[in-house]
Image (cartoon, helix red, strand yellow):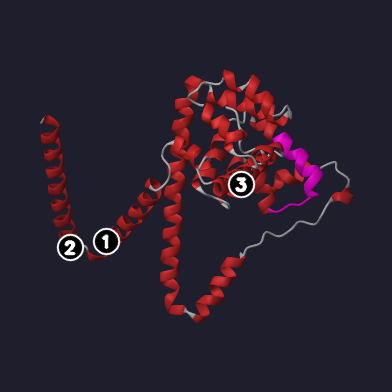
């Protein structure tokens, strides 16, 4: 009875609040019409952001389940995608690329489930900034052949002056001329051309495009919070330490059977589904049904 009374009171207060808010906005519109219009526009943007936030998996177990879907074809395709993304992530980390830039790359193939896994794995990177920059310097000197442009600098989290310093002492034969930073993207060119033929519709296009970015920002905010909470919750089970050890075992090519026999038994049952999910994404296991996998 107490619960029902509290619910009725809270609901009643909410109705009163909404009614007062409505009258306040009406009065504001009477006194400040332009400002009220802007306020209502912002309210709509907030609503779109919240829609993106709450339409994204909020519990990491939901994300694990996404990769373990019951449909065999969908499951296999998703696991192949996850394996490709985690392999790419390992390469980018090895090359010393900047964490924020890595997330930018991953956003190009973004869905919340991939974004969440990549953010989780990034948290296992134990290198100091000095160690990362040294790896970036070595990669730049051997692969980039003297490219000095904004995108290359941003990928390593440095500026153009740092790239020039990294080139000091290297043979001049590997140098390229400085590459100008492209200022116009293909999609901007396309937009300008389309605007010529549909000038009256450009504002509507811009509005919806902005809304897409706002919705996407809400999705990413939800994923960040989900991963942060999962890491915090997993501290008692040594989540990050186990992920680091797991990654070393995968790179050592000891095989899934070895990992299942010597590593998985030491992992807490609370976080074991995560590691079982990763094992099922390794190519030689993707082609087999879950019934062939011993957990």
Q: Contact (CB < 8 A) between labels 1 and 3? A: no
Between the C-alphas of marks 1 and 3, the distance is 47 Å
Tell me, for residue 31, which label it has, or none.
Answer: 2
Q: Position of residue 280 (x, y in %)?
A: 61, 36
Pick whichever, 128 or 66, lies toward us.
66
What residue lies at 79% left-to-right and 46% top-to-bottom?
143
SS at circle 2: helix
Let me know if residue 137 is in the magenta part.
yes
Q: Nearer the viewer, residue 168 or 82?
A: 82
* SS class, disc 3: helix
Q: CA distance from mark 2 to mark 1?
A: 9 Å
Regarding mark 1 in the picture, which secondary structure is present there?
helix
The mark lying in front, picked from 1 and 3, is 3
| Local crowd size for mark 2, using a 10 Å CA cut-off: few (<14), some (14–19), many (≥20) | few
**Disc 3 target residue:** 81
Q: What residue is rendered at 64% in x and 48% in y?
A: 154
* Residue 101 seen by the camera: no
Residue 197 visible to an observer of this rendering: yes
Residue 177 pos. (x, y %):
80, 57
What is the spatial separation of the Cα atoms under label 2 and label 3, in whole angstroms?
A: 55 Å
- Image check: 39 left or right of 170? left
- Give me the residue at 44% from left, 69% from top: 205
Check if mark 2's residue and mark 1's residue have beta carbons within 8 Å. no
Q: Is residue 293 magenta?
A: no
Return the x and y of residue 291 as percentages of the image width and height.
58, 35
Label 1: which residue? 35
**Magenta span of residues:** 133-149
Total marks shown come to 3
Q: Residue at x 15, y 32 (%)?
A: 3
Measured from the top left, where is residue 157 in percent x and y?
64, 43
- Whether 51 is drawn above or below 239: the answer is below
């Amino acid at each position: 009875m107490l619960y029902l009374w509290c619910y009725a009171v809270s609901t009643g207060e909410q109705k009163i609040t909404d009614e007062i808010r409505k009258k306040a906005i009406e009065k504001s519109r009477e006194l400040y019409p332009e400002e009220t219009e802007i306020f209502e526009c912002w309210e709509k943007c907030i609503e779109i952001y919240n829609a993106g936030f709450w339409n994204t998996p909020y519990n990491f177990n939901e994300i694990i389940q996404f990769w373990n879907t019951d449909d065999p074809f969908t499951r296999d395709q998703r696991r192949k995608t996850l394996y490709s993304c985690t392999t790419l992530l390992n390469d980018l980390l090895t090359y010393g690329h900047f964490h924020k830039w890595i997330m930018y790359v991953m956003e190009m193939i973004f869905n919340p489930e991939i974004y969440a896994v990549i953010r989780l794995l990034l948290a296992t990177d134990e290198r100091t900034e000095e160690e990362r920059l040294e790896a970036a310097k070595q990669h730049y000197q051997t692969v980039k052949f003297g490219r000095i442009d904004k995108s290359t600098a941003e990928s390593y989290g440095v500026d153009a002056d740092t790239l020039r310093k990294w080139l000091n002492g290297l043979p001049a034969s590997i140098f390229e001329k400085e590459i100008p930073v492209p200022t116009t993207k293909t999609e901007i060119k396309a937009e300008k051309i389309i605007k010529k033929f549909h000038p009256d519709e450009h504002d509507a296009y811009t509005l919806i495009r902005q809304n897409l970015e706002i919705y996407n920002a809400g999705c990413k905010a939800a994923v960040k919070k989900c991963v942060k909470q999962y890491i915090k919750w997993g501290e008692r089970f040594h989540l990050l330490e186990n992920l680091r050890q797991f990654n070393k075992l995968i790179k050592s090519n000891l095989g899934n059977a070895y990992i299942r026999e010597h590593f998985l038994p030491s992992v807490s049952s609370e976080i074991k589904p995560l590691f079982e999910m990763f094992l099922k994404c390794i190519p030689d296991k993707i082609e087999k049904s879950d019934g062939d996998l011993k957990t």
